[in-house]
Amino acid sequence: MALSMIDKLFQQAKNTTPEEIERLCNGILDAVYNPDQASELTVQLRQLYLVLHASQSEPSVPVQFILRLLAAVPLTDKNRIKECLLCRRILMELIPFHSDDSASQDGSDMKQTTTESSKLLLQALQGKELGCLSKHLAQAVCWLTSEGVDLDTQRRAFFFLVSISLLHSSQVSTDQVKTVSDQMSSWLMNASLCQAPIPYTFNPFKKDQSYPVTEVDGNPATNFFTVLNIGQYYTNDQLLNIYTFSMLYQWLSQVSRKTRTDNSIIDTSEENSQQFDKITLRKIFDSLVDRSIDYAFRVLDQCERKPKVPSDAELQIACLVETVNILDLVCQLDERHIPRVFQEVKRMYSKLSQDPANARIVIHVLQFTVNHCTALSYDASESFKIFFHKLLSRSFSNPAVAFETVLFIRNNLEFLCYETNVLSAYFPSILKILAWNPRSFVSDFCEIIPAMLSPATAMEIFHALLDLPCMTASLEVVDKVKVVDPTSTTSPIGVDHEPTNSADAFKSPLFRPMFNFFTRVEGGHGDTINRYRMIKSSWVSDTKTL
């Protein structure tokens, strides 16, 4: 529901007419001089910023309004900080920034370099029509690869280049892509294994001591540095290593797509174009792909360690998800790596696939399998069975698992429909997501449900859809009983005992088969229900059935 609301707001902002923008600007001008309308002013400024940010064409606003914004930006009134910041963001959307001087800096003046680099984000936001992207791209690459440039400048230049690859990939040349990729491969592999010194203490009579970073289990690190190495303070090269890993997938995904587009223009023959794509991609990303695989394998090894701090377990899960996505992408860029990468991913999957807590990771492993099972002649039916039969039935209530499962099914709907029996066999398990989140995934299931239908399953799916309220109530009862009384499955009440609430109905041998039917994980099981009225009365107190 939240996602659909956000999409609706963005669509409304995109469709805003010039007349509506002018009325909004006039309303802001009226409110800016009235202290009693401070809250209304903030709301209107936010609305205008959303409209300008979502607009696909250059907006037209009154000159007086721009002059008023320019006057508001330098203000330091502590009571109106929100308004000043909003005015600044709106100006970044409205006024093009042209600076020929910034593109001619050679990096020798550190103060000037820092000042100019702070404007890069503004350049990226304006778009190729308003900004001077071609001039600043060369300077950003220069800052990225030059020695002696401070961390903030390199970080801003790196973010700028990745942003341009996302927003205006056609502006980035092949040579620039290769240069940045080579620099990223260096940052991935050459970070220090020693922590940065404590910046708040200095003793001139004591020799500096460097302490190694540690693994998540507390042991000193002996291999190269990764995002999962722990330190109290990080050096600049370690921070660049972390930045590189966090943006590696986006960079590879966007610039490789741009490279394929350029090559398709050069050679219109499909077969020759595909061959040319592979050769070009290998030439550009050969170093980065190799380093990315080594880095990913190192992260997989680190995730097998038991974390010393429990909260690091969440970091391990996040890194595993990102690592599997990166390995999936590099195998798409260079198919020569598929066999050895698959062996590592399969080894990891065998250790994680039995724990419902790892359901998110398994989803991304399944995506890897779908993308490369043809090249490997691998039968993924067992992997699908483990996830949809065992893991999903226990983790469907997890919002992240539910979202990523629906996304996985939609992205691979044709493959799942024609190459597997997942949709026809495990539709009861998949429908639990809809039953538990009835408003969040309605539009998604409007596309998924037709793919589930077949002559053999149509009738059962029809009744399953009619029984969704019963499934929701049953799932809530099962969840409630397991939390309150974990031994409920082994201590049922007598047959003659009439249940007074849903928990007693769940324990009753008379109604237990009905609960099992409503919460089944596989189709083709169960029989006609003839005690619906009786069990319905026991659900009256359950919140999800009201």
Image (cartoon, rainbow, N blue to C red):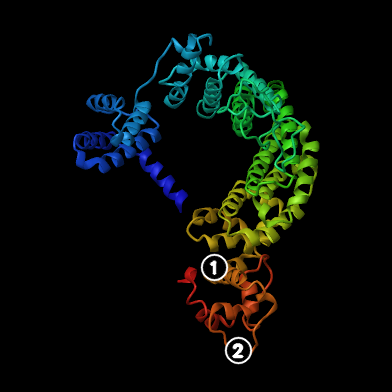
Viewport quadrant of the C terminus: bottom left
On screen, residue 4 above or below 173: below
Residue 91: percent from left, percent from top: 34, 27
On screen, residue 100 above or below 459: above
Secondary element type, mark 1? helix
Which disc number belongs to residue 472? 1
Q: Residue furthest front?
A: 205
Residue 155: percent from left, percent from top: 55, 24
Q: CA distance from mark 1 to mark 2?
A: 25 Å
Sequence-wise, which precedes: disc 1 or disc 2? Answer: 1
Which disc number belongs to residue 497? 2
Amino acid beneath label 2: His
Q: Tell us which disc is closer to us: 1 or 2.
A: 2
On screen, residue 54 above or below 137: below
Amino acid beneath label 1: Thr
Residue 342: percent from left, percent from top: 78, 41
